[in-house]
Image: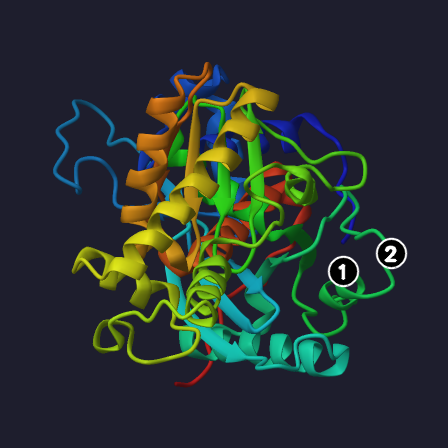
Amino acid sequence: MPQRRETTRATSAEAVLAWAFGTGAFTASEAIDATGLTRSTVLAACTELVRLGWLRDLDDARAAGEYRKGRPARRSELDETAGVVVGVDAGQHRVTALVADLRGTVLARAEGSLGESGLEVPVRLRVVEETVASALAAAGVAPDRVLATVLGIPAPVDAAGESPDDGGFWDSMNPGFAAVVPHGVVVVENDANAAALAERPSSGDASFAALLSGERFGAGLVVDGALLRGARGGAGELRVLDLVDGVSSSDGIGRTARTLVRQARAEGRVPVDSLLGGDDEPDAAVVLAAAALGEPLALEVVDGLGDRLARVCVLLASLLDIDRVVVAGAIADAAGPVIDRAREHLAAWDLDPTPEVVASRLGGDVVALGAVARALDVVRADPLAFPLPAEAPVLAT
């Protein structure tokens, strides 16, 4: 990425552009009030940003129906189509890619399956490459419009995008993506951290944990407004759950639900198969739906899951004094009964602090949405370092 000169002109343009990212159409007077710059400086900055492709000129205030005495006011706004960002959830078994404009509006989505080959690095890289390409094609956006791509992965990631060398799983999850996603800046992020970034707007000023809860527990931790990462990216990995009484592993709600059903059947406690579908290891959503219909084994599983979730929440709240735990991931839509039971356990234990426990509303795309949010943060941190093509070509669809 080319280095730009640090000049007063660039600084003024940065100030105007930073404000434009967070507002709609604006006049020079509004930009002056927001930035504290002089009129001539704001007008020059807007002219420069239009030339660079970041802003577009609109009809003046009078033509837009806003009455103004005297000379009509020039109006400008961010050109949200000047570039795009890509957010990827590169899980072990599935890859999801989202393409979004500079306002964060999702333009297209694509999904690829890794099946049982998620640990095979060549397969993983190929599926990620193909899924990102499919998402761009669906959005009708040429690759040279991508300013930043962020990939959320199920492994700890340090500030440099590297994962600790564990000689196995983490190495396979983070094998290096720059060569197969050659679009703008490429950033690798932990999946739970990405989920926390996605949940940040809905949690306001609260210190909270975004708890991915499907196959495994992993937490993205935001304390006093800051995302916690750790020197090696291990904050929120939750391997400590192996040592927590009543939890004993980092297995999440989905995996634990299947395990509890399998154990019960091995002990000869037969469920109502018409509700559980007769599968040896039914999907967690099926188990939770059966609990809502009163199936005895499913109700027992929900109680066990609620107890387990409550213990994890207590651990997080005790260590970090957080206000809220957001149960996130694809399981969140079905996890209501488990969350309700966890709340009951927390109330009965009467511990302090006791966090609020809620379900995420972002569904299975929470990691990809968080990756989009992180990509936008990357662009907005230093937008003028990103050269934009003179025009915005699109692909034929």
User: Residue 170 has which mark?
Assistant: 1
- Taking the spot 36% from the left edge, 31% from the top edge, the residue there is 345
346 shown above or below 83 = above
Q: Please name whichever residue, 217 or 363, is drawn nearer the observer in this view of the structure.
A: 217
Q: Is residue 201 rendered to the left or right of residue 38?
A: left
The quarter of the image holding the N terminus is bottom right
**In the picture shown, does residue 275 fall above or below 344?**
below
Among numbered discs 2 and 1, the one appearing first in the sequence: 2
Graded by Cα atoms within 10 Å as few (under 14), some (14 to 19) or many (20 or more), the crowding at tag 2 reads: few
Residue 246 visible here: yes
Determine whether 65 is above or below 70 in the image.
below
How far apart, in angstroms, are the residues tagged by discs 2 and 1?
7 Å
Please give the name of the residue rendered at 50% of the width and 34% of the height, measured from the top-left corner: 311
**Identity of the residue drawn at 24% across and 57% down:** 291
User: In screen coordinates, is 65 left or right of 262?
Assistant: left
| Residue type, label 1 | Trp
**Residue 353 place in picture, x, y as percent:** 46, 16
The residue singled out by tag 2 in the image is: 165
Is residue 237 in view from this perspective? no
- Compare residues 302 and 8 and report the one nearer the observer: 302
Q: Do the residues labelled 2 and 1 touch (CB within 8 Å)?
A: yes
Foreground residue among 321 and 397: 321
User: Quadrant of the rendered structure where residue 152 is?
Assistant: bottom right
Judge left or right: residue 29 versus residue 37. left
Element at label 2: loop
Mark 1: secondary structure: helix
Q: Position of residue 228 (x, y in %)?
A: 65, 31
* Image coordinates for residue 376, horizontal then vertical, percent: 53, 47
